[in-house]
Image (tube, helix red, strand yellow):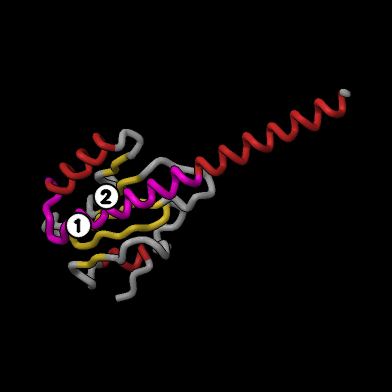
Amino acid sequence: MKRLHLIIAALACLAISGISCWFDHTQAEKQKQKIGSFSTDIPLGATRDFVDRECQRALAAHADWTYHPTLDPSDNSIARLDSPVTDGAGNWVVYILFDDDDAVAAVLVRTLDRKTEHPAKAPPDRLASPQHILLKEFGVAK
């Protein structure tokens, strides 16, 4: 009898784990779609103020997203918008590169783990300036 209880408990744990994994995967896929959609809403050439407003609007709509207006305190030419992290999901992020005039020079969707990895199902890179000096960091060939 004790063995039967252990088997039932083990099966219940497996079922709960399976449902949890399926739910996490489904949520991660929805976040990827939303991040991809957001990335297409940022026009090339837009001002930093416009980008900041759009990112703040996205944060209001998606409370679990985070916005990093600058990734490097000494260089404000890259901003990033993240969706919540789901382990093993290859989370997507949007990198927004600015030119010297603080206008959007590129909008790139990448994985959180590797900024050189353009996800296969992500929207294509959008580049106002294919010569932008930072594009090599993101695996974009000149």
Q: What stretch is highlighted in magenta?
A: 25-49
Instruction: Report crowding for label 1: few under 14, some 14 to 19, many 20 or more residues within 10 A (C-alpha).
Output: many
Q: Magenta includes 44?
A: yes
Number of dots carrying numbers: 2
**Which sits in the foreground, 136 or 56?**
56
Label 2 amino acid?
Ala
Q: Is residue 116 visible?
A: no
| Left or right of 16, for residue 29 | left
**Which sits in the foreground, 136 or 83?**
83
Q: Identify which residue is drawn at 54% across, 44% down.
A: 22
**Which sits in the foreground, 20 or 66?**
20
Q: Identify which residue is drawn at 16% across, 61% down.
A: 44
Q: Identify which residue is drawn at 20% across, 39% down.
A: 57
The mark nearer the N terminus, 1 or 2, is: 2
Label 1 amino acid?
Phe
- Label 1: which residue? 98
- Label 2: which residue? 79
Q: Distance between the residues labelled 1 and 2?
A: 8 Å
| Left or right of 65, for residue 119 | right
Q: Where is residue 7 in the image (x, y as percent from the top left)?
A: 80, 32
| Quarter the C terminus occupies | bottom left
Residue 101 figure quarter = bottom left
Q: Where is residue 109 in the image (x, y as percent from the top left)?
A: 34, 58
